[in-house]
Image (cartoon, helix red, strand yellow):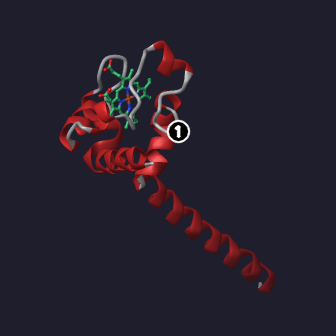
Amino acid sequence: MRLLRWLTVPALAGGILVCAQSQKSPQSGEAIYKQKCGGCHGLDGKADTTIGKQWKMRDLTSPEVQKQTDSDLTRAIANGRGHMPAYELILGSERIQSVVAYIRELGKK
Ligand code: HEC
């Protein structure tokens, strides 16, 4: 009995930790960006990737992109643009907002 308790306690604690983390990370704009957007836009947003070059994508940190309003960027992400898929149904508006905030962060670097 005692042995069982020693085994279940860490297992439970680990489970709670993993849950808390997986609940938190998809909400973070940075995590979403790295997971879903970095492959095309590059982790730094500069589109220095094979796809980025092939499609002549703009650098997300450039003034042309940064001068657009949050709602312009939100619309591009939600509805897609050119080769870019629409993310409205995949992410939902809250997560799109946090990704827009992260694009602003990238622009400051
Ligand atoms: C399959 C590759 C691909 C993925 C994945 C992708 N994008 Fe894009 N994205 C593009 C392309 C291509 C464009 C340029 C579209 C055009 O104007 O022709 C673009 C344009 C944009 C723009 C508008 C920038 C501008 O040029 O004005 C924003 C903002 C953007 N993407 C954000 C994101 C975010 C945030 C994600 C992740 C949720 C993402 N993208 C995922 C390919 C991608």
Q: Residue furthest front?
A: 63
Residue 22 is left or right of residue 2, and the answer is left
Q: Quadrant of residue 8?
A: bottom right
**Residue labelled with disc 1:** 43
Secondary structure beneath dot 1 equals loop
**Label 1 residue near ligand 1, CB within 8 Å:** no
Q: Position of residue 30 (x, y in %)?
A: 46, 50
Q: Amino acid at mark 1?
A: Leu
At x 31%, y 17%, the residue is 82
Pick the quarter of the image with the N terminus. Answer: bottom right
Q: Is residue 38 left or right of residue 100?
A: right
Between 1 and 64, the one nearer to me in the picture: 64
Residue at x 49%, y 13% (from the top left corner): 54
Graded by Cα atoms within 10 Å as few (under 14), some (14 to 19) or many (20 or more), the crowding at tag 1 reads: some
In front of the other: 26 or 34: 34
Q: Position of residue 79 (x, y in %)?
A: 25, 29
Front-lying residue, 30 or 104: 104
Q: Quadrant of residue 87?
A: top left
> Quick check: 65 above or below 9?
above
Ligand 1 is found in the corner quadrant, namely top left
Q: Which quadrant of the view contains residue 63? A: top left
